[in-house]
Image (spheres, rainbow, N blue to C red):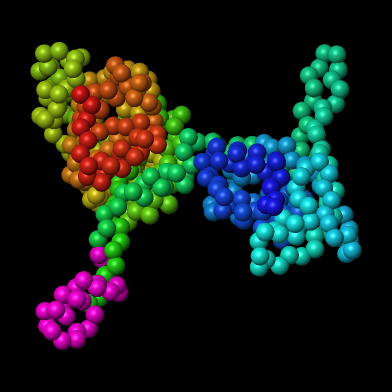
Amino acid sequence: MTARLPDFLYEVISHVRRQGLLLGIDECVALRRALSAGFGLESDTDLVRVCVALWATTREEGDAIRSAFARTELPRWNLASPSVDSGHTSVNGSGIASHPAAIAATEPGIELQEVPALDVTIARRVPKGPGRHRLPAIPIAAQQDPSLIYHPHYPLSQREIAQIWRRLRRPRRDGPAVELDPTATLHEFARSGVATPPMIVATRRNTASVLVLVDRRGSMTPFHDYTDHVLYAITKHAQLDAVSTAYFRNVLGRSAQHDLIDQLPEPWIPALDAIARQITPLRNGRLYRDAELVTPLELNSISKASGVLIISDAGAARGCWSATRVVDTVAMLATLRGIGSAMAWLNPLKSQRWSRTTAEHIARQVPMFSLTREGMYAAVDVLRGRPAEPAR
């Protein structure tokens, strides 16, 4: 027989999976083996520590696991004094396990130790009786982890974001020659007809680099935490060759060609397609090194990258339309095309919110996608060189 994990642990695993941490059979087997060996049985706190050690690879994932335990009604137990001749572990009401040897009876090669007896009772929080005109008191744990109260729940975890952006690859052999090239070695042997030394080449590495421009303040204020979450995952875990980050507000600068709007027969419909090619790049732009928009950054000091990613709502959050902002944005795009060969735009609002706003007209000039899983996949495809037609 294969022993089951306690029922409350399946509820914890379900909560963790909803937060984007993909736990599978291997993680459950690892936990079962740890419990069989006697780890995590001293208390519920000890069990949480074991699960974090087995499942989490970053501090954020550890916080997600602790948050899942905090939202689950756990049995509370204390170990009784160990009994040498008992030969079993008694459990009341939780179904944690029988004797550890029975848990791993089907796993040969695992040596187990005796585990002290468990006495498990369900501790339910019962509020004190309320007064006639008072609300019931809210029980507060004496030792509650404050980080669990404000643990964020984003649409995508850092692991999911990193897996998406690891698809952005430009492999190239670079560095010292340390890898054997069998094909070149055979060709050299066939050409010379005598034994030749093996041909050694450099290893392949990912040379993809991205310049990320993030819009701050104004209508982007509600999305600051999520954009920082996405930016951290791309910078730290995407395994790109280089990720440069710069910040701006709305646009990089004002274009000197606003008078081109007067040449449109109808400035509202269908947008600025008739004059888009006449708009020249910006001569000067306002960029910042930090998210607080304090330290300026010269536009000419930005090094070239294989792709440019822009994260901004493009005016869709306010639901308004501004022809001058479209002109300034087109001039900004013309400037950035000299920095990166490919360009993509991620909008934190869904495409349904772009209608009749500035974002709808900007999307006609650059591939724009929602800041979702599907949108990130599409943006990575564009930065990899796959053509994508802007919205028309």
**Residue at 56% over, 53% down:** 26
Instruction: Determine whether 16 is above or below 175 in the image.
Output: above
Q: Residue at x 82, y 38 (%)?
A: 123
Residue drawn 89% across the image and 63% down it = 85
Q: Quadrant of the C terminus?
A: top left
Percent position of residue 19, x then y = 54, 39
Which of the pair 354/392 is nearer the observer? 392
Tell me which residue sits at (42%, 37%) in the image.
227
Magenta highlight on residue 187: yes
Quadrant housing residue 287: top left
Q: Is residue 182 above or below residue 236?
A: below
Q: Nearer the viewer, residue 104 or 228?
A: 104
Residue segment shown in magenta: 173-198
Does residue 58 appear to the left or right of 300 in the view shown? right
Q: Residue 281 location in percent, x, y?
A: 16, 36
Q: Say above or below: 93 vs 131.
A: below
Q: Is residue 235 in the magenta section?
A: no
**Is any part of residue 244 visible from this angle?**
no
User: Of 190 and 378, which appears nearest the observer?
Assistant: 190
